[in-house]
Image (cartoon, rainbow, N blue to C red):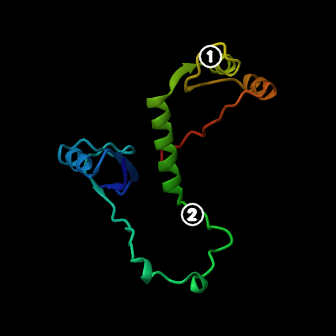
Amino acid sequence: MVVYNLICKKNHKFEGWFPSFEGYKKQARNGQISCPVCGTSKVEKVPHACAVHVKREERTPEKSRPNPPEKPVPPVLTEAEAKEMLIRLHQYVRENFENVGPRFAEEARQIFHGEVEARPIHGTSTSEETQALDEEGVPYTILPKPELDS
């Protein structure tokens, strides 16, 4: 499995997962890759850094290597990048989770207690229902909805 950073003609950046480089080329050639934000199939790979392997004797001795930084610096996302990621997350949930609608709290509770088979679900619940789920220790996540108007 290979992952490529892709960009569409409207400059939306996203990842694509492919079985191989040949799989990517075939899908690209057939116009099967589309932007999850705008739907265009005018998509290309973004250049990326590659690994460079050196011979063992060419490696820098351990003592002269600089110390790694204490804390890694988290990447800073622009507002547009964060919105795009949120849109992609919602799309993934819609495609891969069962929509149980307003029965979410009931279904989540049944899954948690082993009364029904575990499966990925999404839906809606009231604040009272989510408070009850919290009190019972039933895990769930509330996804913020992206504003699509801007």
Question: In the rendered structure, are the residues bearing label 1 and label 2 in contact, judged by CB atoms less than 8 Å apart?
Answer: no
- Which three-letter amino acid code belongs to the residue tagged 2? Val
Q: In the image, what residue occupies the spot 43% across and 82% down? A: 57
Residue 135, x across and y down, in percent: 81, 27
- Tell me the quarter of the picture where residue 54 sits: bottom left
Q: Is residue 99 above or below residue 143?
A: above
Residue that protrudes farthest toward the top in the picture: 115
Q: In the image, what residue occupies the spot 61% across and 84% down? A: 63
Mark before the other along the chain sequence, 1 or 2: 2
Whether residue 102 is visible here, answered yes or no, is: yes
Left or right: 132, with 12 as reference point: right
Q: Is residue 123 above or below residue 110?
A: below
Residue that protrudes farthest toward the right in the picture: 135
Question: Is disc 1 placed on a helix, strand or loop?
Answer: loop
Q: Is residue 41 above or below residue 135?
A: below
Rounded to the nearest angstrom, the CA distance separating label 1 from label 2 is 37 Å
Label 2 Cα neighbours within 10 Å, binned few <14 / some 14-19 / many ≥20: few
Residue 108, x across and y down, in percent: 65, 22
- Tell me the quarter of the picture where residue 126 sits: top right
Check residue 103 in the rendering and tell me which mark sits there, or answer none: 1
Residue 131, x across and y down, in percent: 78, 27
Label 1 Cα neighbours within 10 Å, binned few <14 / some 14-19 / many ≥20: few
Check residue 76 in the rendering and tell me which mark sits there, or answer none: 2
Question: Is disc 2 placed on a helix, strand or loop?
Answer: loop
